[in-house]
Image (spheres, rainbow, N blue to C red):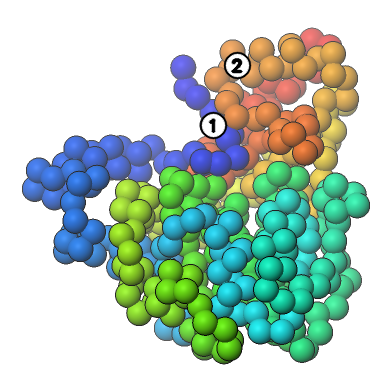
Amino acid sequence: MKKHNFSAGPCVLPKSVMEQAAAAVLNFDEGLSLLEISHRSKPFVDVMENARSLALELLGLEGKGYKALFLQGGASTQFLMVALNLLEKRAGYLNSGTWADKSIKEAKIYDDIYEVGSSKAANFNYIPKGYDIPEDYDYFHCTSNNTIFGTQMKSFPNAPVPMVCDMSSDIFSRQLDFTQFDLIYAGAQKNMGPAGTTLVVVKEDILGKVSRKIPSMMDYKVHIGKGSMFNTPPVFAVYVSMLTMQWLKDLGGIKAIEEINNKKASLIYSEIDLNPLFKGYAVKEDRSNMNATFTLENENLKETFDAMCVEAGINGINGHRSVGGYRASMYNALSLDSVKALVEVMSELESKA
């Protein structure tokens, strides 16, 4: 039976990428496995350079003063690295979800951190708006998509200071003017590849302005200088991320995938709104195209609905404990057919109720 993988992360990957990655594990370089080659060997150096180049190309940032890095430690380490590299006196953070909240907690270790807006009181079911970003901040930090709560920033402020964005769960999913961001980071496992590496895209001219000493492993300039090879990189994760980005490029890039993502989101949200058995969690204007969160109006139907999903091969739609209910993560590699399969089960439940 075909499995429809709606897991929030690690993410669904394209079948062709999985096949290429599986083959590389057995034989990547003249009989050597991808898992055992030297990261200093030319074949893998080429992989790293290609991955970094593809990231900038897909985002439209080639030749615009940006560098792409593939680091370790997940987005959680970036909460710390951003502050270490950019925070001198004070910074502003938009608190729109669990991970934004955690980024604030980490940054507060160093200096003054101010929440310019927060939706915490409403359990993060919307994106804060109408906030001010003072010109004396070192930077402004936001989270583009909130995986747990199913909200997404549809627009970004015209910040008078460098703008940093955690794009872990919607990187490469929609067209944006990426030059408005001075630093972007994204854990690979939600929309780009397997767990183990984190993409960082940073504009070089914002670095080197803090007075503190930065440990080498936490210094963006050190990693840029070493081409993401300052220490042994996560070879497999970088390789699969490269394959996924190449798959996206061959598909037609972000423009092409955005059209598909819009269709998937429209399909499931239409069912949520029209089916009286279900209710959306996030406010409509802030609904995420990547993570649709919803609940059953009648919890007595949960056992029946869960069994129907299992029978249809639907996997990974349980909601996070912070929200409950269900969460359908519709990352780039999830097919429209998978969303149709879920919608059919939801519709069938209504006919049975």
Residue 68 visible here: no
- Secondary structure under the numbered disc 1 in the rendered image: strand
| Disc 1 residue type (three-letter) | Asn
Using the numbered discs, state the Cα–Cα distance from disc 1 to disc 2 in whole angstroms.
11 Å
List x then y, in percent, for residue 4.
Answer: 54, 28
Label count reads 2
Residue extending farthest left:
30
Provide the residue designation for mark 2: 310
- The x, y position of residue 251, in whole percent, is 42, 53
Tag shown at residue 291: none
| Quarter of the rendering containing residue 317 | top right
| Amino acid identity at mark 2 | Val
Would residue 176 appear left or right of 92 to someone viewing this image?
A: left
Q: Percent position (x, y) of residue 301?
A: 81, 14
Disc 1 target residue: 5
Residue shown at 55%/20% (left/top)? 313
